[in-house]
Amino acid sequence: MILKRGEIGAKVREIQYQLERLGYNIGRFGMPFDEQLEATIKAFQEEMELPVDGRVGETTRLKIQSAVAAIENSTDVNQNSAYSNQLQHPPVANELGDFINGNWQQWQVICSQTLNARSGPGFNYSIDMRFPTGTVLMLHPEYRYPIKFDQVGKPWLVISYQGGAFFIRANQRFIKPMI
């Protein structure tokens, strides 16, 4: 079976989940196989030295599965303890005010106006919701890497609200980790 642009369903979601696990920016889980997913698959295929066509055929599917298995099997005790230690201390913003590490469960909106939540990581995505100052937002549980970068390299945090995934700008002008 070949997955290509326009496809929908569980198999597309599974590929999205696997690519996100590998650190690729797939946008929202459960979306149709779109231009962004096709570009992500092409990037994966190029990195793995596979024929680059943006489709998930048997060879690409097996390579994705093997890459995910390699990541899961390579996690050792030191990585687990470093990750656990990281979760005990709230993220600190860098010199630009950006949060590069988003592995913190609760975040509070602190901007003076409403915070725009978008359908993808970047200002070019539509605004789906607006959160007022003081709103507490939860990290989205399905994303192993909750920080996604937009086209210009700015970090966006994937949060969960009413079961959906939304992207908010990961900067201390807008949000802070809840302690």
Image (cartoon, rainbow, N blue to C red):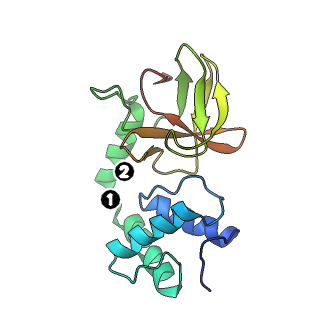
The total number of labels drawn is: 2
| Residue where numbered disc 2 is placed | 80
Residue 122 in picture, x, y percent from top left? 49, 42
As helix, strand or loop, the secondary structure at mark 2 comes to helix
Q: Which residue is mark 1?
A: 76
Residue placed most toward the observer, 64 or 156: 156
- Of the residues shown, which amino acid type is indicated by label 1? Asp
At a point 54% along the width and 53% down the height, the residue shown is 27
- Residue 179 lies, in percent from the top left, at 48, 21
Image coordinates for residue 17, horizontal then vertical, percent: 55, 62
Note whether 38 is above or below 125 in the view shown: below
Q: What residue do we see at 29% from left, 52% from top? A: 78
| Residue density around tag 2, few if under 14, some if 14–19, many if 20 or more, within 10 Å | few
Is there a contact, CB below 8 Å, between mark 1 and mark 2? yes
Tell me the residue at 54%/13% (across/down): 112
Mark 2 is on which residue type? Asn
The N terminus sits in image quarter: bottom right
Res. 102 in view: no
Instruction: Classify residue 44 by image quadrant.
Output: bottom left
Query: Could you tell me which secondary element the residue under label 1 belongs to?
Result: loop
